[in-house]
Amino acid sequence: MLSRFFTRNEQFVLIALAGALSLGAITLHWLSTRPHHTQQNVASFYESSPNTSHTESAHLNLPARSQNANALLQTSDTAAQTPPITGEQQSPLPYKPEKPKIRVAVMGWVVRPGAYEFAEGDRVDDAILRAGGVKEGADINDINLAAPLIDGSTLIIPRGPTARIAQGRLVVRGPDTSNRLRNPPQYTVSGWRALSNPPAENSPEPHTSSTPDPLDLNSATLEQLVSLPTIGPVLAQRIIDARQTRPFSSVDDLSRVKGIGEKTLEKLKPFVTVK
């Protein structure tokens, strides 16, 4: 039938063209059945190629970069801009060295007397609390609770005055002044004030009495004679024995007492007399 309209050569051309069209149609149909795989291969090719522009990717109807690739790039950019964490940033709190240890004994009118360990800078009230607090009747009026503790010292809490009934009578016992005096001056209010306000260098010295009145050799007691310079109990007794035998008429009569020579007599003359 074709021979009526076309020559033999034209018929061959038409047959070849029809075959090419059929082959193209089959190829397109096969490609349409696997679109995702093809786009992924093409996209990965253009992602790995540094010379491929965004225009060419858009022309192929493919994204310039996948969402996963953009996320990875954003993460890497953020990591590159974030400075590394140093040791100081990991430990914001400054290092505080431990304070040296000291040891102080807490004695007297406390619940648990004993020696305790404290940190340097602890106060007297810390020591009292460590010893269980004060017992009933303790006198802390003169205790400097804010004073810093001294290594190797002893804090003594004195007992205050007490009163009780004994045999139908009221017996009052005074405060324990001996313990109060044995405390370091820093631990007492009175001692701390004395240390804080020393007397001025140019301030006049307090008035003191001059040389005491001379002792009468014929009436002085043994205790009074012992208070004299260079006189002990033995010499004092010899002076008493000598005056009982014969009273002294002058200070020079001391030379007849055994053990009192010229040098001792010269030292005693300002302090003795004879009446």
Image (tube, helix red, strand yellow):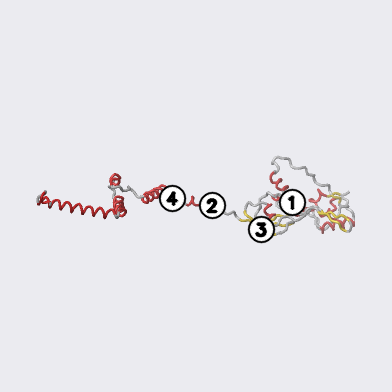
Of mark 2 and mark 3, the one earlier in the sequence is 2
> Which residue is identified by label 2?
95
Query: Residue 41, located in which quarter of the rendered image?
Result: bottom left
Kind of residue at badge 1: Ile
Residue visible at 48% across and 52% down? Answer: 87
Element on which disc 4 rests: loop
Label 3 vs label 4, nearer the camera: 4
Kind of residue at badge 4: Pro
> Which residue is identified by label 1?
140
> Which residue is identified by label 3?
116
Residue 66 as seen in the image, left or right of residue 136: left
Of mark 1 and mark 4, the one earlier in the sequence is 4
Residue visible at 73% across and 40% down? Answer: 204
Element on which disc 2 rests: loop
> Which residue is identified by label 4?
84
Which is nearer the eye, 156 or 275?
Answer: 156
The 10 Å Cα crowd at callout 3, few under 14, some 14 to 19, many 20 or more, is few
Label annotation for residue 12: none
Of mark 2 and mark 4, the one earlier in the sequence is 4
Q: Position of residue 209 (x, y in %)?
A: 80, 44
